Image: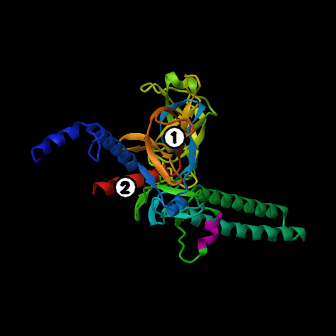
Amino acid sequence: MRAMLPALCSMMLLLPGCWTESGPPEEREAQAQDSSTETEHAADQVELTPEAMASSKLEFAKAEERVLRPFLRLTAELRTDPDRVAQVGPRVAGRITSVHVQVGDRVSKGDPLVTVDSVELGRARSDYLSAVARVEVARQAWQRESDLLARRATSTREAQEADGAYRTAMAELEAAHSMLRTFGVSDDDLQARGSAGTSPSSITLRSPSTGSVIKRDASLGQNVDAKDTLLEVADLSELWLVAKAFERDLGLVEPGQEVIAEIPTYPAHQFKGRIGHVGDVLDERSRTAEVRVVLANPDGRLKPGMFATALVEGAHAHEQKATLAIPYAALQEVDSHAGVFVRVAERRFAFRPVHIGERAGTDVEILNGLSAGEVVVTDGSFLLKGELLKATLGEEE
């Protein structure tokens, strides 16, 4: 009986339907592959809690066929608008006695920036005060002679001489006043000359506009001349986006076209403007012309000197075409692969690698990886990427 057991077992193994609990090798291998695929798909998914879903404020878009308007991609840089930058400096030689601001400070029009003490200014102000006194003396003399002439108690000649002296004193006063204005002394400064703590030889340079201090070349005790620029105040509520268009592309750009600016510092945001000017002269070395766009910067996030990419809409030699497209904001990069988060359930999202084609404004062409009608996450996709990476790191640990 014992001798028959091995043979019986061999026969059972050969009979169809007599498999072990896990099935034949081929089926077990297929099951293992399916299990691996399911695990892999699960690893590429993110499920949010109801609370996280409510607070994330995700926005969605459908992948759909649409006509794309191709764009021209230009390298660009942010610059200040020269008409919004004020250079502040003394109009008279002197020595700095006080500096009231630092680089980066916000200032309003009329705010004090730097105080300068000047011997020349003190002399000019003294001349002005002397002229004021002479005018008053001459005025009284003229008034007295006029009264005497009315009573015929003086000669016409003496009255005319008093009138001439008064007019001369007035002219000298105006000249002294004009000299002070040349030095930057305002009428308010003249009125404050007798205030406590003020010096007749000092002048406070004030901000000519509202903005930010972007440059300061002023130190306490520094000797300065009328030609020196001590500070720069810039209104940064609008900036110039200056792009470089190659000679071959100049026929595709013109004033009025809409431009989307992409700033590497803010990858999730796009800034829009319109072409205001296309340069009239080519740079001989680069064979490019400057294309200028005004960008609104109300919150001050954009900084002069930042590099950018200018996307000129509708400026492409290719014909417009209908293709599967989604908003570009939906794209994220995970493990060096571009992809999107597809909504697979109410609170569950799967990362799907895709291949992209041309960009056109805020949209991007999808070559494969998505089907028309599938819903992808646009705003908030970066949050899902963070949750996916967090879960991946947790599994590795």
Q: Is residue 127 left or right of residue 356?
A: right
Query: Nearer the observer, disc 1 or disc 2?
Result: 2
Contact check, label 1 and label 2, Cβ < 8 Å: no
Q: Outermost residue, bottom direction?
A: 196
Look at label 1 and name its amino acid.
Tyr
Element type at mark 2: helix
Query: Which residue is located at x 14 percent, y 45 percent?
Result: 5
Q: Outermost residue, front direction?
A: 1
Inspect this view and state whether residue 228 appears: no
Residue 260 lies in quadrant: top right
Magenta-drawn segment: 187-193
User: Mark 2 sits on what residue?
Assistant: 391
Look at label 2 and name its amino acid.
Ala
Q: Is residue 339 magenta?
A: no
Residue 60, percent across and down? 56, 47
Query: Which residue is located at x 40 percent, y 52 percent?
Result: 388
- Judge the density around disc 2: few (<14), some (14-19), many (≥20) Cα neighbours within 10 Å: some
Q: CA distance from mark 1 to mark 2?
A: 25 Å
Q: In the rendered structure, which disc, 1 or 2, sits on the residue that comes first in sequence?
A: 1
